């Protein structure tokens, strides 16, 4: 799906494709996207070790806080930053559980 994500502090954003995935237990942003768009990284208090993911086996050390826009919906959220390859954003189980979108 196509979403807009923007920085909290200056409300500057970008339109990206997001992947919905009901087998991923988090919400993630690709680290290259975060760097390119200069999102402010926040260091996690505790490393997040993930198994069987797009993340190439690296520990997740940072997250970003964003405003996310989808159609008429606006939401402030945190996304863990990691290596997602060709994917920009993954919206996993936590997001799906709250929003329960109808998917065609």
Image (cartoon, rainbow, N blue to C red):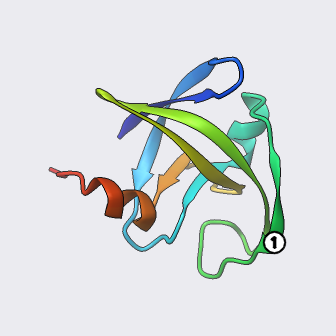
Q: Residue at 74% x, 75% y: name it.
A: 57
- Left or right side of 89 for 43: right
Q: Residue at 61% x, 66% y: name it.
A: 54
Q: Is residue 23 above or below residue 34?
A: below
Q: Is residue 9 above or below residue 39?
A: above
**Residue designated by label 1:** 47
Within the image, what quadrant is residue 27 found in?
A: bottom right
Q: Quadrant of the N terminus?
A: top left
Q: x, y (%) of residue 58?
A: 79, 70
- Left or right side of 86 for 74: left
- Left or right side of 65 for 38: right
Q: Is residue 10 above or below residue 82?
A: above
Within the image, what quadrant is residue 13 found in?
A: top right
The answer to whether residue 58 of the structure is visible from this angle is no
Q: x, y (%) of residue 19?
A: 43, 51
Say how many tags the image has: 1
The answer to whether residue 81 of the structure is visible from this angle is yes
Q: Residue at 68% x, 38% y: name it.
A: 33
Q: Secondary structure at mark 1?
A: strand
Q: Residue at 66% x, 27% y: name it.
A: 7
Q: x, y (%) of residue 52?
A: 59, 80
Q: x, y (%) of residue 18?
A: 45, 44
Within the image, what quadrant is residue 34 found in?
A: top right
Nearer to the camera, 62 or 23: 62
Q: Residues within 10 Å of mark 1 (few under 14, many from 20)?
A: few
């Amino acid at each position: 799906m196509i979403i807009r994500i923007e920085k909290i502090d200056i409300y500057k954003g970008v339109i990206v494709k997001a992947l919905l995935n009901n087998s991923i237990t988090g919400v993630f942003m690709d680290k290259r996207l975060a760097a390119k768009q200069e999102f402010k990284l926040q260091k996690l208090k505790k490393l997040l070790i993930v198994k069987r993911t797009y993340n190439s086996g690296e520990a997740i050390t940072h997250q970003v806080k964003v405003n996310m826009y989808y159609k008429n919906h606006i939401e402030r959220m945190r996304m863990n930053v990691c290596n997602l390859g060709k994917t920009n954003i993954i919206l996993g189980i936590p997001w799906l559980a709250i929003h329960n979108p109808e998917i065609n």
